[in-house]
């Protein structure tokens, strides 16, 4: 499979990710367990978005975007657009991921000062998991072209399923993963600081924090299965696929604290994501009939998400949730 990723580019990218994680870990350990303010979350979110756009600018320059070679400029423009589209899609899907994190944290009443550590561990797991899945996915596509049709059908199904599930509160009490954990581990009734295991009446038990981390890991797997086929609909270049994914994930922790108190305000976003997934699934299924330009995919994704977010602010959640009842009564 063709890729723009040279050994130098891969090395620089890996070095950057390691440095970014070390800085994040250092900042977290220096601050200790504390409640993240909206201002702090907004600052870090802007930093990560800014870094992502700096990387895109560097990629465009490195590939010859400012040169006189027309072929190099065309390649630079195409790859930069692919990165931006992939980044936007992965960032949008990450927002839905964040709302699930919020549900888990709320269900287990995770203290705000402990949530930062859980998210950091979840991000590390997501980075490793996605790197493995992307490399495997790229190899499969290179070997078996028909895998693209399978990915497209899966995204189409996922989008339709997301549309019907939008607005419904997940039933965590009956979640199979949580039932399995409870059947295998004795869970302490209360937290013991940031410890994963504690002793209650002489019995060693898993702390609720460990259960939360396991569930967050499972959420990472579920969302990786959804999001990775989506980015392969934009490009099959492993370098662009991985970098757009990683940059979207690196800012996930800050974005969580920024949006944690705003999830009800964007109650229609899941519908927008569902439409985007259906569009991307259709794009992948039509790849050998008509290849939809990446610029169209970027425009459609941006407009769809923007419209659903604006409508979320205009239409109160209670009115939207009441619509199915009105239609049923009218019928």
Image (cartoon, grey):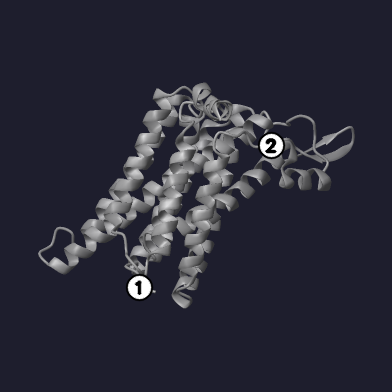
SS at mark 2? loop
Counting other residues with Cα less than 10 Å from the Cα at mark 2, is it few (<14), some (14-19), or many (20 or more)?
Answer: few
With 34 as the anchor, is 188 left or right in this view? right
Q: Along the line of sight, which residue is nearer the eye, 266 or 152?
A: 152
With 256 as the anchor, is 279 left or right in this view? left
Residue found 59% across the figure and 51% down from its top: 222
User: How far is disc 2 from disc 1 in space, using C-alphas?
Assistant: 44 Å
Query: Residue 188 lies in what quarter of the image?
Result: top right
Q: Along the line of sight, which residue is nearer the eye, 132 or 264?
A: 264
Q: Along the line of sight, which residue is nearer the eye, 136 or 328?
A: 328
Please say if the residues under marks 2 and 1 sit with CB atoms less than 8 Å apart: no
SS at mark 1? loop
Q: Which residue lies furthest to the left in this view?
A: 68
N-term-proximal mark, 2 vs 1: 1
Residue found 38% across the figure and 41% down from its top: 48
Judge whether residue 35 can be spotted in this image: no
With 293 as the anchor, is 323 left or right in this view? right
With 308 as the anchor, is 54 left or right in this view? left
Q: Is residue 261 above or below residue 199?
A: above
Query: Which quarter of the figure is the C terminus placed in?
Result: top right
Task: Kindly identify which residue carries mark 1.
Answer: 2
Task: Kindly identify which residue carries mark 2.
Answer: 171
Q: Is residue 328 above or below residue 20?
A: above
Query: Which quarter of the figure is the N terminus placed in?
Result: bottom left
Relative image position of residue 90 (x, y in whole percent): 43, 49
Q: Along the line of sight, which residue is nearer the eye, 267 or 27?
A: 267
């Amino acid at each position: 499979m063709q890729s723009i990723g040279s050994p130098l580019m891969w090395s620089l990218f890996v070095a950057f990710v390691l440095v970014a994680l070390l800085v994040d870990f250092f900042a977290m350990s220096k601050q200790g367990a504390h409640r993240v303010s909206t201002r702090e979350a907004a600052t870090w979110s802007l930093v990560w978005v800014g870094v992502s756009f700096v990387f895109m600018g560097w990629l465009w320059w490195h590939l010859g975007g400012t040169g006189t070679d027309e072929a190099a400029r065309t390649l630079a423009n195409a790859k930069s657009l692919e990165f931006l589209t992939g980044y936007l899609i992965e960032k949008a899907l990450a927002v839905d991921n964040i709302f699930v994190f919020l549900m888990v944290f709320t269900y287990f009443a995770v203290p705000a000062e402990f949530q930062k550590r859980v998210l950091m561990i979840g991000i590390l797991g997501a980075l490793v998991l996605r790197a493995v899945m992307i490399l495997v996915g790229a190899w499969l596509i290179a070997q078996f072209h028909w895998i693209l049709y399978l990915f497209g059908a899966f995204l189409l199904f996922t989008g339709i399923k997301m549309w019907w599930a939008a607005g419904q509160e997940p039933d965590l009490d009956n979640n199979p993963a949580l039932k399995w954990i409870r059947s295998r581990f004795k869970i302490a009734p209360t937290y013991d600081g940031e410890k994963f295991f504690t002793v209650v009446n002489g019995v060693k038990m898993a702390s609720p924090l460990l259960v939360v981390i396991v569930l967050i890991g499972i959420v990472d797997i579920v969302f990786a299965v959804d999001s990775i086929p989506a980015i392969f609909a934009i490009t099959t270049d492993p370098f662009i696929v991985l970098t757009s994914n990683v940059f979207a994930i690196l800012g996930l922790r800050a974005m969580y604290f920024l949006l944690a108190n705003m999830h009800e305000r964007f109650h229609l976003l899941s519908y927008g994501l569902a439409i985007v997934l259906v569009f991307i699934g259709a794009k992948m299924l039509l790849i050998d009939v008509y290849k939809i330009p990446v610029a169209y995919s970027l425009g459609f994704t941006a407009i769809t998400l923007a419209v659903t977010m604006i409508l979320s602010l205009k239409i109160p959640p209670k009115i939207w949730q009441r619509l199915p009842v009105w239609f049923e009564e009218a019928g």
